Structures are given as structure tokens and as C-alpha cells.
Amino acid sequence: NQQELLARVRSLVRIKRYHDTIEAQRAELADWNKTLEARVESQVEELEKVNRLRRFLSPTLAELILSQGESILESHRREIAVLFADLRGWTAFSVNTEPEEVMSVIREFHASMGSLIREFEATVGWFAGDGLMVWFNDPVPCPDPSLRAVHLGTAMRTAMTGLTGTWRRRGHELDFSAGIGLGYATLGRIGFDGRYDYGAVGTVMNLAARLCGEAKGGEILVSTRLAAELEEIAETEEMEPLTLKGFARPVPAMKLRRLKLA
């Protein structure tokens, strides 16, 4: 029957058309899924990068590095201002104090210093229970690394005056000291797959740490090179040259009294 045959053919053609449409939509959906998965994976990678960078950079600088690429994290040499801060009396305190109270002091110290580090956009090089090291002018250059370092140092000293007073009322004899140096260092990404950090190597790092070690409670010692750059805005006091571990000759240094300008 010709009419019945044509009707069946038309029906089969419609079914075939529907089948082709469904297959095309399925293929298109699969492509969309692949694209979506790629976008999600890319966004997850970006978030992981941001989280890694935020461990030693302010959020603003982390976003800037992501926008420019990770090439600026490769090994390079640059002049930086390094600040090393420490808690005086930490060894005796940690030995003679209950662990819960030690952890409480560490959290208070980190919270106070961390907020200032973010405010001044310093790069965190090292952070421990009783000390920290940060620097300026890398990985993102800034025009006034020495000025920023002393501003941060004095802000830390002011903040720690109140905090150490609170600790003394709780029976803890702790105080704050800092050392600041200016010089060249080699910087870049260090570590291994799954655990990378951003580090620096150079004499200036040791100098800042040794100056901090020589500083008494409430003191900030700075290198003469850094003091010379800030002669007009910082009030300093000359010291006798210091015999520092790792340095063949006595090292001249200055005490940072205060900043003349706000």
C-alpha cells in the first residue's frame, strides 16, 4: 500500500531527524561540559596560586603577580630592605610556661604583626613563634623600600609596647626588638613540587638578623647604609661598631630613635 508505505517512511524520517538532533545536542553538551571543566580547573588553579601567594604577599600584590604571570617569581637579584623582628626573653618564657599559654602569646603576636605586614605590603620571608623576617622592593618593586621598612618597624614597636605591657601583667617578661638592613639579595621561588615558597639569599638577610639579635628590648637597630638614605626623616643614634657572627670585621650600626615626619 503506497500511502501506508509513505506514512511509515515519513515517520521513520522524523524519528531519524529527532535522533540526529538529540545526538547533536548530546555532542554539544559534551563540549560544553569539557569547556566548563576546563574553566573550573583553571579557576581552581588560580585560587590555589592566590592562596599560595597570599602566604607571603598582601592580597593586592598577589593579584598583581597573577595578572603579570609567575615569571617575576623566577630567580633574580635586587636591592631590598630587610626587617627582622624578635621577642626578647622567648627561650626562658617558652621553657617555663604552659604550652597553652605559649600558643596564646604566639597567636597574639602573629595577629598584631600580621595586620601591620599587610598594611605596609611587605613580603613575608620567614615567620616563626618568636620572630619574623620581611622585606620590601620584591617581587614587586617599590620606590621607597627603606622608608617603608622603618615605618613598619616603628609601627611594630608601637603596637608591641601595648602588647608586651599586657604580657607583663600576666607574668611574662617579653620584649620586642628589630633590625633593619639594606642591600642586594638573590630572590626567587624555592622548594619542591607541592610545596613552594618565595625566598631570599644574601648578606643583607644575615645583617638584619644579627642587628636584631644585638638590639635590646624596645630597640630598632639599622645599618648605616639604610640610615644614610633616611637621614632627613629619621632620628638615629650612632653606636660603637658591633662584632656580629658571620662578619669578619666589626659592623657599624645606628639606633633608630623615631621618625621626624609622620
Image (tube, rainbow, N blue to C red):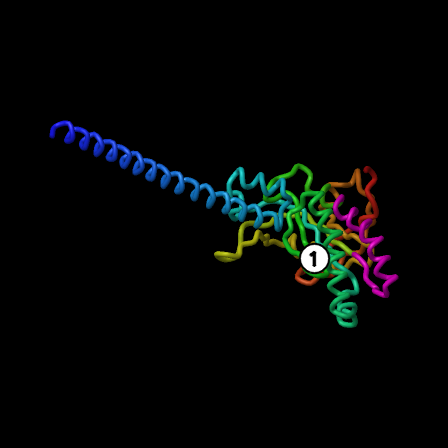
Query: What predominant SS class does the magenta segment belong to?
Result: helix
Left or right: residue 38 versus residue 166 is left
Q: Position of residue 257 (x, y in %)?
A: 83, 48
* Residue 231 falls within the magenta-colored stretch: no
Q: Amino acid at mark 1?
A: Ala
| Vertical order, 7 against 52 (above or below) | above
User: Looking at the image, which residue is at 64% across and 46% down?
Assistant: 80
Q: Quadrant of residue 118?
A: top right
According to the picture, the residue beneath numbered tag 1 turns out to be: 209
Q: Position of residue 49 (x, y in %)?
A: 54, 47
- Depth order, front residue of 27/93: 27
The quarter in which the N terminus is drawn is top left
| Vertical order, 153 against 166 (above or below) | above
User: Looking at the image, which residue is at 65% across and 38% down?
Assistant: 142
Left or right: residue 201 versus residue 180 is left
User: Looking at the image, which residue is at 76% across and 41% down?
Assistant: 230
The magenta segment: 151-176
Q: Position of residue 21 (x, y in %)?
A: 30, 34
The quarter in which the C terminus is drawn is top right
Residue with the most extreme left position: 1
- Depth order, front residue of 48/260: 48
